[in-house]
């Protein structure tokens, strides 16, 4: 019972570190809240079956960023296994299946002679038609075939000669476009438009710091493709957008130009794409939960 309490405590701590409530976790995993509470308390008796115990624990662990296989292996002695009643039930169903298979085999044996007779009749008809057509072709007089060939040759028109095409005279070289025009050439080169640059990023723990240069604006756009926690705060730690779990299709936008600083918290970075002034930010780390700090450097 102690290990079960440790398992529940470990899952609950991981959930709280993500900032998830039980309602949030219910939305992410689609598991009823009362089953999530039972997992944290080690009360597996209310589960619909032992199969669902392992399945729900695995979903819970993956949702809070833990290695599900490692959790199941570490607490395998304390997690219920398949009950003997379930095994006995599956064994009791085997004779019925064998009876169904026997009936299907008998029906197939009964219909097999009819199928063979039908195939024999079809093959006989096709063979008779083929021989009949071959006999008709061999009985046709050779004179008729030769007359048909001569008539075809007479009706075929002789090939016509290719019409003579008059070659066009080459255009006068003096008529080349652009000559003799008074329009002056635009010799002035356009000045290159400055472009923004996002640094490679410096990771430290689960936090990565980027520098934004070459621009005077810092518009943040986060496109969410799956359930993930998103939060944006300024340098003082004040909340800039609503911190919560965002769902697939939602977009988080914030103009951080005035702050010249933004700290983005992602609960599941794989489900979120961060764009700075419409340029996608490349993650340096592959961790699921991470902090991204962006600082706007003033132009020279």
Image (spheres, rainbow, N blue to C red):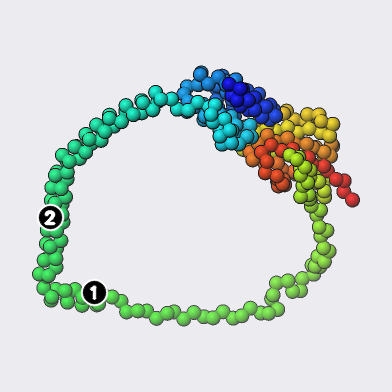
* Mark 1 vs mark 2: in front: 2
- Residue at x-position 87% and y-position 46%: 298
For label 2, the crowd category at 10 Å Cα-Cα, with few meaning under 14, some 14 to 19 and many 20 or more, is: few
Q: Say above or below: 12 vs 162.
A: above
Q: Which residue is mark 2?
A: 124
Q: Position of residue 8 (x, y in %)?
A: 61, 24
Q: Say above or below: 172 vs 111.
A: below
- Residue at x-position 56% and y-position 34%: 73
Nearer the observer, 67 or 248: 67
Q: Position of residue 104 (x, y in %)?
A: 23, 36
Q: Say above or below: 296 vs 9.
A: below
Q: Residue furthest right?
A: 300
Q: CA distance from mark 1 to mark 2?
A: 38 Å
- Residue at x-position 70% and y-position 72%: 177
Asked if residue 59 lies left or right of residue 233, the reply is left
Disc 2 is placed on an element classified as helix
Inspect this view and state whether residue 253 appears. no
Q: Position of residue 56 (x, y in %)?
A: 54, 28
Disc 1 is placed on an element classified as helix
Nearer the observer, 183 or 216: 216
Q: Which badge, 1 or 2, comes first in the chain's sequence?
A: 2
Inspect this view and state whether residue 128 appears. yes
The answer to which image quadrant residue 147 occupies is bottom left
Q: Which residue is mark 1?
A: 152
Nearer the observer, 82 or 169: 82
């Amino acid at each position: 019972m102690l290990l079960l309490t440790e398992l529940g405590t470990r899952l609950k701590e991981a959930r709280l570190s993500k900032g998830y409530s039980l309602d949030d976790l219910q939305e992410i995993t689609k598991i009823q809240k009362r089953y999530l509470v039972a997992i944290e308390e080690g009360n597996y008796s209310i589960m619909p079956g032992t199969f669902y115990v392992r399945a729900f624990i695995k979903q819970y662990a993956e949702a809070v960023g833990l290695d599900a296989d490692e959790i199941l292996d570490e607490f395998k002695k304390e997690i219920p296994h398949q009950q003997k009643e379930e095994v006995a039930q599956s064994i009791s169903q085997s004779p019925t299946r064998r009876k169904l298979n026997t009936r299907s085999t008998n029906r197939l044996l009964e219909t097999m002679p009819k199928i063979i007779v039908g195939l024999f009749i079809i093959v006989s008809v096709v063979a008779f038609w083929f021989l009949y057509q071959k006999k008709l072709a061999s009985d046709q007089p050779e004179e008729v075939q030769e007359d048909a060939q001569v008539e075809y040759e007479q009706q075929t028109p002789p090939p016509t000669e290719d019409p003579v095409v008059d070659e066009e005279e080459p255009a006068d070289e003096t008529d080349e476009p652009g000559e003799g025009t008074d329009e002056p050439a635009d010799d002035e080169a356009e000045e290159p438009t400055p472009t923004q640059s996002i640094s490679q990023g410096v990771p430290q723990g689960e936090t990565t710091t980027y520098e934004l240069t070459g621009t005077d604006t810092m518009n943040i756009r986060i496109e969410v493709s799956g359930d993930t926690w998103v939060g944006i705060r300024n340098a003082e730690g004040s909340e800039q957008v609503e911190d919560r779990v965002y769902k697939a299709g939602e977009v988080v936008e914030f103009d951080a130009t005035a702050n010249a600083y933004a700290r983005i918290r992602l609960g599941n970075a794989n489900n979120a794409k961060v764009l700075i002034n419409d340029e996608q930010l490349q993650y340096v780390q592959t961790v699921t939960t991470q902090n991204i700090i962006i600082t706007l450097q003033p132009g020279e």
